[in-house]
Image: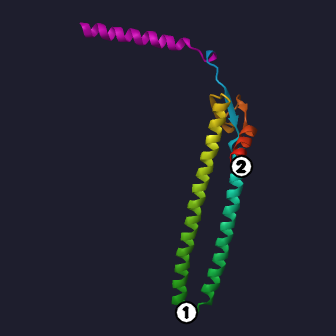
Amino acid sequence: MNSRKFVIFLLAVFAFVSAGVNLVRAEDAAYDVAVIDVQQVVEESAQIKKLKQEQQAKVDELIKYIEKVRKDVALQSDEKKKKKLEEKFQKQLISKKEKIDKEYIKKLAGIDKNISKTVENYAKDNNYDLILSKGTVLYGGEDITSAIIKAVSAEK
C-alpha cells in the first residue's frame, strides 16, 4: 500500500510541476537575438582572401608542373618508357593535389573556428542570448553582420 501512495504522490508532484512550467510564458523571458550573414562575413574575411590567393598560387604551380610533365613525356620516344613516365607523373600529381587539398581544408577549418570564436565572444560581450544565420530567419533579430566583419578583421 505504501508504494501505491508513493506513486500517487509522485504523480501529484509531476502534475504540479508541469502546471507550473506552463505558467511561464514566452513573453516573460526576454531574449536578445541577433542575426549575421555568414556568407558575407566569410567573403569579406581577410583570412579567406589570403587563403584564396595562396590556393591560386598553388594551383598555378600545379599547372606549370603539368605542362613540364607533358613536355617530358612527349620527348620520350619509347612507348613503354613513355607509359611508365606517365604513370609516375600521374602518381606524383595526385600526391601533390592531395597535399594541397589537405592543407587547404586544415587552414579553412582554422579560419572557421576563428570566425565562430569571434562570434561567440561578440555574443558574450554584447549580451546576446542567441545568434542565428540570417538566411534561416524570416523576421526578427538584430543584424550584427557588419560588427562581426569588423571583429573578424581585427582578430587577424
Residue 7 on the magenta segment: yes
For marks 2 and 1, give the one nearer the viewer.
2
| Quarter of image, res 117 | top right
Residue 43 on the magenta segment: no
Q: Amino acid at mark 2?
A: Ser
**Disc 1: which residue:** 78
Which residues are the magenta region?
1-27
Q: Nearer the viewer, residue 29 or 115?
A: 115
Q: Which mark is residue 151?
A: none
Residue reaching furthest to the left: 1
Image spot of residue 33 (x, y percent) = 67, 28
Q: Nearer the viewer, residue 98 or 120?
A: 120
Dot placed on the residue nearer the N-terminal end, 2 or 1: 2
Q: Which mark is residue 45?
A: 2
Image spot of residue 71 (x, y percent) = 65, 84
Report helix, strand or loop for mark 2: loop
Q: Is residue 104 left or right of residue 45?
A: left
Q: How many numbered callouts? A: 2
